[in-house]
């Protein structure tokens, strides 16, 4: 019975599960996104996010602890070099799981797991969205009223200039008539 056992064993023995999660975490760190099943991704999230948090403190001890989990020098170097710089001001939630279509062979739920700060298309879309204004029925009416009010204000200086020129023209015409 599995009373009080909170994590998913994924149908593997403990060493096999640890090795699989270590390999998946190394791949995620090196490639920034991996395609896997939803169950494995949820377990990988619990495995890799504490390691990313530990990488914010670049000390010998934290490097050794992370290496004991990942068993890959390249992944540790990438994590403490590039990844930790990007996530330095993020308080958590370093990974994103995007669900995909089910796998054809066994109909398993598939997903794309990625590091949040490394998806340039979503980051560009987020800044573009922030730049756009809210468009609605009411706000459009207010903008047209504001534009109508602003238009006469812009025309008044040119009208004053015309008025200044007409008296001078009238005075010159009056002089010619006399």
Image (spheres, grey):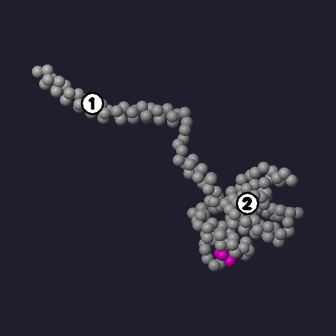
Q: Which one is in front in this view, the residue at disc 2 or the one at disc 1?
A: 1
**Residue 11 as seen in the image, left or right of residue 55:** right
Residue 65 magenta: yes
Question: Disc 2 on helix, strand or loop?
Answer: strand
Disc sitting over residue 34 in the figure: 2
Number of residue marks: 2
- 37 versus 56 height, above or below: above
Q: Quadrant of residue 40?
A: bottom right
Dominant SS type (magenta): helix
**Residue at the spot of label 1:** 162
The residue under the point 79% across, 67% down is: 20
Q: Secondary structure at mark 1?
A: helix
> Residue placed at 30% from the left, 31% from the top?
159
Mark 2–mark 1 distance (CA, rounded to whole Å) = 70 Å
The magenta stretch is 62-67
Q: Where is residue 50? Give x, y as percent.
A: 68, 67
Q: Quadrant of residue 155?
A: top left
**Looking at this rendering, what residue extends furthest in the top direction?**
177
Give x and y (percent) for residue 176.
Answer: 14, 23
For the N terminus, give its image quadrant. bottom right
Residue at (76, 62) in percent of width and height = 43
Left or right of 24 in this view: 155: left
Q: In percent of the image, x 51 and y 34: which residue is there? A: 140
Residue 111 lies, with reference to residue 74, above or below; the image says above
The answer to whether residue 20 of the structure is visible from this angle is yes
* Residue 31 magenta-highlighted: no
Q: Give the position of the C terminus as an image quadrant.
A: top left
| Residue 46: % across, % down | 72, 63
**Mark 2 or 1 closer to N-term?**
2
């Amino acid at each position: 019975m599995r009373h009080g056992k909170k994590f998913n064993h994924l149908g593997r023995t403990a060493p096999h599960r640890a090795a699989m999660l270590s390999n998946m975490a190394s791949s995620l760190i090196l490639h920034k996104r991996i395609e896997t099943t939803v169950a494995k991704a949820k377990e990988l999230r619990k495995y890799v996010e504490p390691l990313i948090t530990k990488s914010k403190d670049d000390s010998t001890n934290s490097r050794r602890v992370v290496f004991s989990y990942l068993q890959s020098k390249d992944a540790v170097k990438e994590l403490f070099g590039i990844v930790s710089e990007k996530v330095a001001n993020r308080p958590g939630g370093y990974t994103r799981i995007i669900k995909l279509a089910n796998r054809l062979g066994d109909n398993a739920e598939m997903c794309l797991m990625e590091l949040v700060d490394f998806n340039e298309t979503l980051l560009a879309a987020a800044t573009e969205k922030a730049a756009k204004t809210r468009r609605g029925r009411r706000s459009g009416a207010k903008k047209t009223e504001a534009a109508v009010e602003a238009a006469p204000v812009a025309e008044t200086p040119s009208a004053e200039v015309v008025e200044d020129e007409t008296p001078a023209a009238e005075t010159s015409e009056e002089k010619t008539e006399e």
